[in-house]
């Protein structure tokens, strides 16, 4: 993708109303290359049209967003997914991010924020909402001495660095990346690389809290 | 029930079907004498709606006759052989059973197609088939054969009791073998019945869940939707209602069992944060977005922190003009902190009106009284953030 052209976006959501709403909000800033309302059609069309970003509903019949990520990922690992849901249930967030989504936003996100999140996803960066940042902090630091469910090959995956924790806290407090860069006196790019590192840890870590999230914590 | 013999007999004799059935049952229990009689009637009497009886059909077919002859000879030979091996006491019973078995053979060979379907149904319902259609005939035959042999052996052992020494052992082994044989014969049917039952129970639970869901959707979502339609001209009210419903559904999804019981006073930090969210959203029509990391119980100091945080949130809702307030709370082992941030129009802390000065003090003073601190950062273009920190005295958490 050249930086000048609009990102090519594909919509997957089983609610026509939501698709229409998103389409209306985004049409100025991105190019919508297609939409699908169920898993099988979505996988086929995404593989065929190779969008830059797939905006993906988490909750759908026949396996939901997770099934789409897995189905497309088997053919083409380069497609980037941004999950979109009304739910903030922890098990959904963690499951979809661990399956490979670059980020997670809720459906009540405002138009400009959604555009920013899509641009960021297209550029290969991670998109962390306040809540997702909160989840990660909860999983990685509040029960710091909990063991991993399986021994990690790379113990660093199970730990966040001090800087990463600082960045996550600021996200959870409602700061934008730019404000975070200002606050910590670091470059914008550096903030982004910290967040991407956290995403990688979130996807690969074997921490007990992540692998057993669903049973461990059913609240908020 | 099986072959319709009782029903037919009752109709012919002009008595009730039930009493004929009872009579048949008694005759079966009397050493099984009823079984061959029943089968004989089944074979010998023409079925209603058909032109000839099973016996008639079998006896007019040359090949069927040959088969019957050979099998009968083989059975009698086997019986005599068994009797010489010392199964005297079983004699009458065994003869009757053999007769019945022969009758059953005739029945199977000679019955009409519709009757055969009926028989097949009875067979698969009663015996030796664990699940419909999935069993190979070899395994069915093996099981049936094994079961019958076990049961016969058990009975033969039991029949010797009293003639020989060591009777108790025979009783034990015999009864065991009998039970084992019956178990092998009937276990699949029994298991299937139980499985069907548990399946039914699961289906009932699912239906129950559905009903609960429907009730909840009706009570809350439908009501809200109709309220929204009525308030369609008032965007603030619509937003408020939608938020209310969203919060309601979220808490129901997160914990359906505890739903509706949460109206009592909060006992943890997390619960109080949600209480602030509820209160401010309902009273000021401003969204409060709560993120909580960790949790802890409410003691005096934490309660003061929550009160200060509530004050700051209400301030932001009243004065900032922002439509959303971010509330972030983190409970660490050494410190509990709370951040209230809005992106509305901030203020210059040096030029605050006197009444807000007071509120600021109440936040500050509350915090310092419990050993914590409050910092208020505000600028005209990027909104306001209130930072509350409360160190936790070293205690077991």
Image: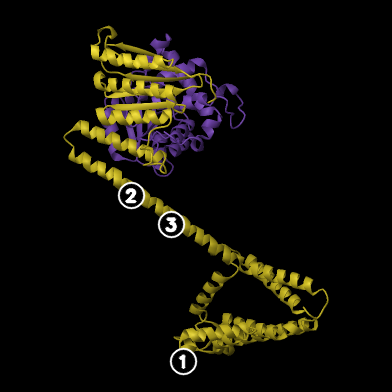
User: Alpha-carbon neighbours of circle 2 within 10 Å: few (<14), some, or many (≥20)?
Assistant: few
Q: Residue furthest bottom?
A: B13
* CA neighbours of label 3 inside 10 A, class few (<14), some (14 to 19), many (20+): few
Residue B296 lies, with reference to residue B139, above or below; the image says: above
- The tag on residue B12 is 1
**Residue B229: quadrant of the picture:** top left
- Which label was assigned to residue B204? 3
Q: Secondary structure at mark 1?
A: helix
Between marks 1 and 2 in the image, the one whose residue lies nearer the viewer: 2
**Quadrant in the picture for residue B352:** top left
Quadrant containing the C terminus of chain A in the rendered view: top left
Can residue B346 be seen here? The reply is: no
Residue at the spot x=42%, y=32% of the render? B267
What percent of the width, then of the height, locates residue A208?
Answer: 55, 31
Which secondary structure lies at badge 2? helix
Q: In the image, which lettered chain appears yellow?
A: B
Total numbered badges shown on the rendered structure: 3
């Amino acid at each position: 993708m050249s930086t000048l052209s609009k990102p090519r976006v594909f919509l997957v959501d089983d609610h026509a109303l939501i698709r229409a709403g998103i389409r209306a909000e985004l049409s100025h800033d991105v190019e919508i290359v297609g939409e699908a309302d169920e898993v099988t059609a979505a996988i086929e069309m995404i593989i065929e049209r190779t969008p830059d970003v797939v905006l993906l509903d988490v909750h759908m019949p026949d396996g939901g967003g997770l099934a789409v990520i897995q189905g497309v990922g088997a053919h083409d690992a380069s497609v980037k997914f941004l999950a979109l849901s009304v739910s903030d249930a922890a098990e959904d967030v963690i499951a979809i991010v661990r399956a490979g989504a670059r980020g997670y936003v809720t459906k009540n996100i405002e138009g400009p924020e959604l555009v920013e999140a899509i641009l960021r996803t297209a550029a290969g960066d991670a998109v962390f909402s306040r809540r997702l940042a909160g989840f990660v902090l909860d999983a990685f630091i509040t029960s710091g001495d909990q063991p991993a469910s399986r021994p990690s090959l790379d113990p660093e995956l199970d730990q966040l660095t001090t800087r990463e924790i600082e960045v996550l806290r600021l996200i959870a407090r409602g700061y934008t990346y730019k404000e975070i860069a200002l606050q910590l006196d670091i470059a914008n790019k550096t903030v982004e690389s910290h967040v991407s590192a956290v995403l990688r840890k979130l996807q690969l870590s074997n921490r007990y809290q992540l692998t057993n999230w669903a049973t461990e914590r059913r609240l908020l | 029930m099986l072959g319709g013999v009782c029903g037919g007999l009752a109709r012919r004799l002009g008595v009730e079907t039930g009493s004929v059935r009872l009579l048949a049952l008694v005759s079966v229990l009397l050493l099984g004498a009823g079984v061959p009689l029943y089968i004989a009637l089944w074979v010998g009497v023409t079925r209603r709606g058909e032109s000839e009886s099973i016996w008639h059909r079998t006896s007019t077919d040359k090949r069927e006759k040959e088969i019957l002859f050979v099998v009968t000879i083989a059975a009698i030979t086997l019986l005599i052989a068994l009797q010489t091996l010392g199964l005297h006491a079983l004699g009458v019973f065994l003869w009757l059973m053999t007769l019945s078995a022969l009758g059953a053979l005739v029945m199977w060979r000679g019955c009409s197609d519709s009757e055969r379907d009926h028989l097949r149904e009875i067979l698969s319902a009663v015996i030796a088939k664990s699940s419909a259609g999935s069993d190979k005939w070899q395994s069915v035959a093996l099981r049936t054969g094994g079961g019958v042999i076990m049961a016969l052996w058990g009975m033969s052992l039991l029949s010797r009791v009293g003639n020989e020494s060591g009777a108790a052992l025979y009783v034990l082994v015999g009864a065991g073998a009998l039970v084992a044989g019956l178990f092998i014969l009937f276990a699949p049917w029994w298991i299937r019945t139980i499985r069907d039952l548990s399946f039914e129970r699961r289906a009932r639970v699912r239906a129950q869940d559905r009903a609960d869901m429907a009730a909840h959707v009706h009570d809350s979502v439908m009501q809200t939707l109709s309220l929204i339609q009525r308030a369609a001209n008032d965007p603030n009210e619509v937003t408020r209602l939608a938020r209310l419903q969203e919060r309601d559904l979220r808490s129901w999804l997160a914990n359906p069992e505890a739903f509706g019981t949460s109206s009592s006073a909060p006992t943890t930090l997390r619960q109080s944060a949600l209480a602030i969210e509820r209160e401010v959203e309902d009273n000021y029509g401003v969204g409060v977005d709560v993120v909580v990391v960790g949790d802890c119980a409410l003691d005096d100091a934490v309660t003061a922190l929550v009160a200060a945080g509530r004050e700051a949130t209400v301030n932001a809702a009243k004065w900032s003009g922002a439509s959303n307030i971010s509330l972030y709370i983190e409970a660490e082992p050494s410190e509990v902190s709370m951040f209230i941030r809005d992106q509305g129009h901030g203020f210059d802390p040096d030029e605050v009106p006197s009444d807000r000065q007071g509120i600021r003090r109440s936040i500050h003073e509350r915090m310092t009284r419990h050993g914590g601190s409050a910092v208020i950062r505000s600028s005209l273009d990027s909104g306001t953030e209130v930072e509350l920190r409360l160190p936790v005295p070293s205690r077991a958490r």
